[in-house]
Every structure is written in C-alpha cells, then in structure tokens.
Amino acid sequence: MSRQADRDVNHALRARFDDVVSQYQRLRLGLDDIQERLSTLAVTEESADGTVRATVGARGQLIDLRLSRDVYRRGDPDELARTILRTVERAVAKTGDRVQEMVGEYLPAGSAAARFLRDGDFGNLLARQDRIMREAGDDDGR
C-alpha cells in the first residue's frame, strides 16, 4: 500500500509540475506581445470641464498635456493645478487597470506577481516564501 501512495503522490507532483511549466511557457511566449502592447499604451483622460487633457504611458508617466484656451479665462492657478492633478491621477489609475488586464492574460489571477501589479505591495512578491520560511521554522521547533 505504501508503494501505491508513493505513486499517487508522485503522480500529483508531476501533474502540478506540468501545470507550472505550462504556465511559465505561456508567460514566456507572451512577453514579446506584452512588451509591444505596453510600449504603445497611452491613456488619455479629460477633465470634467474639458479644459485639461492628460495622456500617460504604461508606467504612468505623463506623455502629453493639453490645456484649452478657456483655462486662461479662469484666473485661478490653484484650481487649474488641482484640475490637472485630478485628470492625471485618473489617467494613471486607468493605465494601471489596463496594464493589469494585459499582464493578467498571462499570469494566474492569484499569483504574487498579479497581486503586486494590482496593489504595488512588494510584500506580495515574497508572501509565499515568507510563509514557507515561517512553516519551516515551526517544523524545526523554533
């Protein structure tokens, strides 16, 4: 009975390994596609009043800013600055969503990398390894 249990465990491990390799190969093959799509990604947002138009790239960098002639009639530079900031922030948020969608086509939804892209928390990248290390420490009697 022990040999059958060993075979079952080996079979399960092999199936998991094959799944991981398949996911990796899919991601690796998609990297060129992702890079190309990211290099051309540009998201534009316009302020509610139509006076500010901001375009950002895949990393959230401002690549274009257009102001309508009407902004000069407003006369309040602080309000204009707030409008610009809000418009750029919305464009950056939308860009982040699009990047997540693109990369999400290749990453498992619950993966550490996908969580990192979603919230920018570096702790997500090592969460699984941290858990393994804690469990290994518990097993050692620490």
Image (cartoon, rainbow, N blue to C red):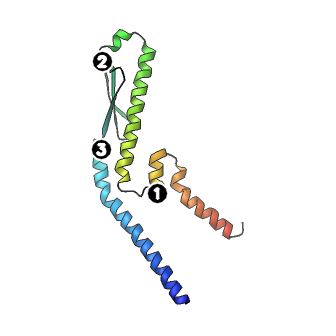
> Mark 1 to mark 2: distance in Å?
43 Å
Give the image location of residue 115, x and y in percent: 47, 51
Give the image location of residue 12, x and y in percent: 47, 76
Q: Amino acid at mark 1?
A: Ser
Q: Nearer the viewer, residue 94 or 40?
A: 94
Q: Which residue is mark 3?
A: 39
Mark 1 or 3: the one toward you: 1
> Mark 1 to mark 3: distance in Å?
24 Å
Q: Residue at x 40, y 41 (%)?
A: 96
Q: Amino acid at mark 3?
A: Ser
Q: Residue at x 49, y 82 (%)?
A: 8
Which quadrant of the structure image shows residue 84?
top left
Residue 2, above or below 115: below
Residue 111 got which mark?
Answer: 1
Q: Is 40 on the left or on the right of 85, as rendered?
A: left
Q: Quadrant of the C terminus?
A: bottom right
Q: Quadrant of the N terminus?
A: bottom right
Q: Residue at x 36, y 56 (%)?
A: 106
Residue 136, above or below 75: below
Which circle's residue, 2 or 3, is located before the other in the chain?
Answer: 3
Give the image location of residue 27, x and y in percent: 35, 59
Determine the secondary structure under disc 2. Answer: loop
Q: Residues within 10 Å of mark 2 (few under 14, many from 20)?
A: few
Q: Residues within 10 Å of mark 3 (few under 14, many from 20)?
A: few
Q: Amino acid at mark 2?
A: Ser
Which circle's residue, 1 or 2, is located before the other in the chain?
Answer: 2
Residue 55, above or below 78: below
Q: Which residue is mark 2?
A: 68
Determine the secondary structure under disc 3. Answer: helix
